[in-house]
Image: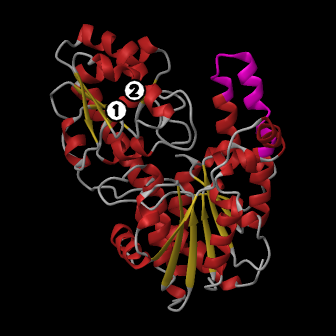
Amino acid sequence: MSLICQKVMCTKLTCRCAAEQKDFVDMRALIVTATAPPMAGKDVHAIYRRLRMFVSSIGRVCSEIDILHFAPPGHWSLNIDPAELSEMQSSYWGIKVSAFVAPLNVVTSSWSTYARSILSASFQGKFSGFAGQPQVAAVRLCLRRNPDLLFVHRLQAMIPVLQIRRNLPPILFDLDDIEHRLVIRGALDTASSDRRLIRLLHVPAVIMVEYWAASLAQNIYVCSELDKLYLQKLGFGKGVICVPNSIDIPNIIPPAPKQPTILFLGVLRFPPNADAADRLISRIWPKIRSKVPLARLIVAGDSPQSVRSFASKPIGVEFPGIVPDLEQLYRESRVICCPITRGGGTRLKLVEAAAFGKAMVSSTVGAEGLSFENGTEILIRDEDDAIADACVRLLTDDDLCDQLGNGAHRKARICYNIDETRDRIQAHVLESISTNSPR
């Protein structure tokens, strides 16, 4: 059993006891998130589902919750009455919240900006929209409501907070993805040696922001034990805590369907997902179809046009877009394939597939940080031929398909049960608020 599984099991009772010992009924939390206000039925992908896990946990402790979002210019949330926005967001999160939104900063690229971006992450494209005075002012305005706790979601949202620094309440910080590692991987995937070097020059500035944010926060959350150990080796300290992406795990799973259907699910406008889908369609799928001619491939998620192969209308491939009934989609799918080669964090799509008892084939990067064991709970393959062969085996071997699905479901119940994860977050919130000292 993995270290994270052992820790979840050992801390379950402790966290529940801590939650029962105190009952803060008059506490306010401020959540600052890098995401735009979500819309019901549309924003269902992993970043919002992870945020929901924290919002619901904080809502167990704090009677009042403010959420500050940042949105690009022209976003629908910037032109809506604040009271209506709060009502919509309360409905989305399932608890009463006061929602606020600030526009992202618009930065014009120039040689001067590029030179500064090497020295400061605030000038880099991913972070520059959060670094202007309007964004800092928005955080200051929300802080005037005197929150007892500040929860910051993603490193981008930390940028304006870092410019305030003083007289802040206790901070819990969900780093989630290790941003400097994403920059490194993106650089190494770049074909041009010049562009690779240019991207790598941005890494030290991102690491400095991560260190700075960690020094300000009481706890720093990442989504895998692997990420936690990595940051601790870099000297981020004992404040780094693994909070895995977790979901409701059904007690009973449906039998695997006989139809030879493979599913790839993800936000397709996210380049690593789009590239993985294109790899599956153009390089792996023909090998599978040659051996299982009746096989179907479902590539589900928004913006299917982001996948290069979409325009060619490949035979046997379906692009249903956003699917509102994910449970039914999983019921129809026999095998889940995740041939991702870059990106960070952990794949909620695989946790979700395991919750439904699905047999899974993934690349090493796709399964990175997850606790599923190769051969008994998942098949991990990296070469195109090996991925295709693994999919064919699962499409044609009922016993192996059931074995992997049942094994993955058991592991998901142990490691990725959202009730246990919420208990742990709730205990951290209680502990942080009890300190209640300005930082």
On screen, residue 113 versus residue 360, left or right, reads right
On the picture, is 228 further left or further right than 82? right
Q: Name the residue under label 1.
A: 304
Count of numbered badges drawn on the protein: 2
| 194 is within the stretch colored magenta | yes
x and y percent of residue 240 in the render? Answer: 69, 58
How crowded pointer 1 is (Cα within 10 Å; few <14, some 14-19, many 20+) is rated as many
Q: Residue 28: horizontal and vertical position, in percent?
A: 56, 84
In which quadrant of the rendered view does residue 332 lie? top left
Q: What residue type is labelled 2?
A: Val
Q: Quadrant of residue 112?
A: top right
Identify the residue shown where x is 34% and y is 40%. Answer: 302
The one of 124 and 1 positioned closer to us in this rendering: 124
Q: Is residue 5 above or below residue 290?
A: below
Query: Left of 260 or right of it: where is 245?
Result: right
Q: To which quarter of the image does residue 395 belong?
A: top left
The residue where tag 2 is placed is 307
Q: How far apart are marks 2 and 1 (CA)?
A: 6 Å
**Farthest residue in the bottom direction?**
26
Query: Residue 12: percent from the left, percent from the top?
Result: 50, 68
Q: Are marks 2 and 1 in contact (CB under 8 Å)?
A: yes
Circle 1: residue type = Pro
From the image, give the main secondary structure of the stretch colored magenta: helix
Q: Is mark 2 on a helix, strand or loop?
A: loop
Span highlighted in magenta in the image:
187-205
Foreground residue, 170 or 82? 82
Q: Is residue 151 above or below residue 344?
A: below
Q: Nearer the viewer, residue 118 or 405?
A: 118
Is any atom of residue 339 visible in this view?
no
Would residue 233 be counted in the magenta stretch?
no
